[in-house]
Amino acid sequence: MAIQMVIEPDLEAKRQLVTRHSVREAQKTYHILLAEDNRVSQRLTVALLQKKGHAVTVAENGKQVLQILAIERFDLILMDGQMPEMDGLETTCRIREQEKETGAHIPIIAMTAHALNSDRERFLEAGMDGYLSKPIRPEELFATIEAVGRTR
């Protein structure tokens, strides 16, 4: 005697084959502004982000960040701590001042070679939403992006 199994349509719709491709498609992608003056770090970070499907625009200093933000919207900013003309702390302070007028908030993640706990606290107190020490580790980069991105 054969046993016939009946699967409800809704249950069948919930059962999907999970592959690397379907997981990648399910991951949220972001429009990211990368503030980084070092060309090697720029190339590496852009390659990592684009491989995960994120769109990336690069600024080489804080002044460029402010100019780009005046004309384009982003989901988040990866901000180098030390840049010429205007560093990451000053740039973040200026962005947060502008946000007081608009009521908007863009998540900012510090990326810096300053790796002491006091450095981390200093960046967070300046208004940054996350912190990564250099050299950047891909797993930590993506985990921080996801954590900060969820708070939007």
Image (spheres, helix red, strand yellow):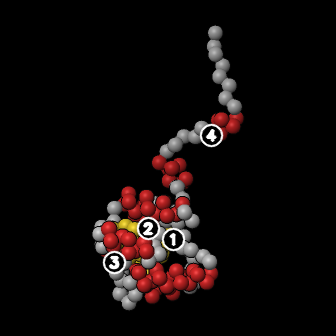
Which one is nearer the viewer's eye here, 50 or 8? Answer: 8
Q: Earlier in the sequence, mark 3 or mark 1?
A: 3
Mark 2 residue type: Gly
Question: Is label 4 in a helix, a strand or a loop?
Answer: helix
Q: Earlier in the sequence, mark 2 or mark 4?
A: 4
Q: Mark 2 sits on what residue?
A: 130
- The residue depicted at 47 percent of the width and 69 percent of the height is 129
- The residue depicted at 51 percent of the width and 71 percent of the height is 107
- Tell which tag, 3 or 1, sits nearer the viewer: 1
Looking at the picture, how far across and down is residue 90, in whole percent?
Answer: 42, 84
Circles 2 and 3: CB distance less than 8 Å? Answer: no
Which image quarter is the C terminus in?
Answer: bottom right
Mark 3 residue type: Arg
- The residue depicted at 47 percent of the width and 75 percent of the height is 127
Q: From the viewer's perspective, is 74 left or right of 131?
A: right
Give the answer, above or below, for where 64 lies relative to 17. Answer: below
- The residue depicted at 57 percent of the width and 76 percent of the height is 73
3D distance between C-alphas at marks 4 and 3: 45 Å
Circles 2 and 1: CB distance less than 8 Å? Answer: yes
Q: Mark 3 sits on what residue?
A: 39
Q: Earlier in the sequence, mark 1 or mark 4?
A: 4
Q: From the viewer's perspective, is 25 left or right of 63?
A: right
Q: Looking at the image, can residue 101 be seen?
A: yes
